[in-house]
Image: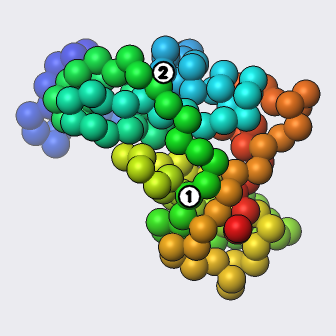
Amino acid sequence: MSLVERITTSADAKVWYDNIPIESLYTVGIAGEKFFRAIKDRGVIMGSVCPSCNLTYLPPMMYCERCLAELEEWVEVGTKGTVHTYTVVGVSLEGEPLEQPEILALIKVEGAHGGLVHRLGEVKPEDVEIGMPVEAVFKPKKGREGSILDIEHFKPV
């Protein structure tokens, strides 16, 4: 059976006992490129605005998910937001215990639709609260590479 054939019974299922050789290249696209360049070059967070629905998307998009309008207007959404939800991580992606737990949070920026998932810093896990105001802490300009990690973390304000 080839990969495009449809499995109709459990007897048709196959097992692969080796690595599947897959190569891919992820690109951030036009909206992602503009978003990360603004972080890298200017230390600002940008969103894209739908003129029909009056929504500001963060992260920015090229098209409105509600009305499919092309989003050509970009605005700075600011660097402050609130913790919408969070989790405390004690194990690395490799399954090893972390020396210090990390706090990951969904940061909602006022006036923006969506938000950013990022690290919280300069705060202890027991002091984090939903609704807590936070602000982005950027790497020094010389150390920025054009990724979300150019924001070192969000700190309480």
Residue at point 73%, 28% (across, down):
42
Dot 2 amino acid type = Ala
Snapshot quadrant of residue 53: top left
Q: CA distance from mark 2 to mark 1?
A: 21 Å
Residue at point 38%, 38% (across, down):
56
The one of 53 and 9 positioned closer to us in this rendering: 53
Residue at point 27%, 27% (across, down):
51
Residue, disc 1:
81
Image location of residue 146, percent across then percent down: 71, 25
The one of 147 and 42 positioned closer to us in this rendering: 42
Q: Secondary structure beneath disc 1?
A: strand
Name above or below for residue 32 compared with residue 14.
above
Name above or below for residue 108 compared with residue 11.
below
Which part of the image, by quadrant, shows the N terminus?
top left
Dot 1 amino acid type = Gly
Residue, disc 2:
31
Asked if residue 113 lies left or right of residue 79, the reply is left
Asked if residue 38 lies left or right of residue 98, the reply is left
Snapshot quadrant of residue 55: top left
The single residue placed furthest to the bottom in the displayed view is 126
